Amino acid sequence: MNQFLREELEELIAEGIKNGELKKDSPFPAVLQSPKARAIRRIAEIANSRGWQIEVTRALDKHAASYVDDLPESAVLALRDRMEYFEECVQCACDPDDCPPAR
């Protein structure tokens, strides 16, 4: 099992036990709340809504990783920050500093 997934599962079980019981009757699945897990969901949200999957691929290639889960936490957080920066540029109609002008 992936180390990241194992740690997240252990945290989830510990949290459920700490709260008295796991919420088995919830209509929604549990959502991991580690900084890395939240960053991965944010990356997916931006990449899927804007069609920027290529930026995720670039980050994976840079770190020779097959999956975003395989990236170290620092790389995931940096990718999230970059994706949020791109999104902010789009919303403000300005170009990222390290990219050619879009207009």
Image (cartoon, grey):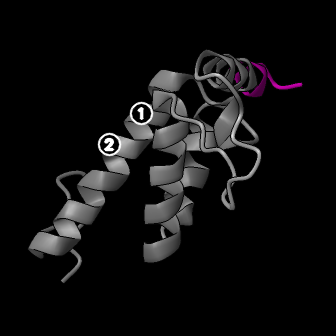
**Residue 21 at x, y percent in the picture:** 70, 28
Q: Secondary structure at mark 1?
A: helix
Q: Which amino acid, by three-letter code, is at mark 1?
A: Leu
Q: Main secondary structure of the magenta part?
A: helix
Which residue is at the front of the view, 102 or 74? 74
Q: Residue at x 61, y 21 (%)?
A: 15
In the picture, measured across the screen, residue 31 lies left or right of residue 76, that is right
Q: Secondary structure at mark 2?
A: helix
Q: Which residue is mark 1?
A: 77
**Residue 38 at x, y percent in the picture:** 48, 41
Q: Which residue is mark 2?
A: 81
**Residue 91 at x, y percent in the picture:** 17, 73
- The segment highlighted magenta reads 1-7
At label 2, counting other C-alpha atoms closer than 10 Å, the crowd grade (few under 14, some 14-19, many 20 or more) is some
Contact, mark 1 vs mark 2 (Cβ under 8 Å)? yes
Residue 80, by quadrant, is top left
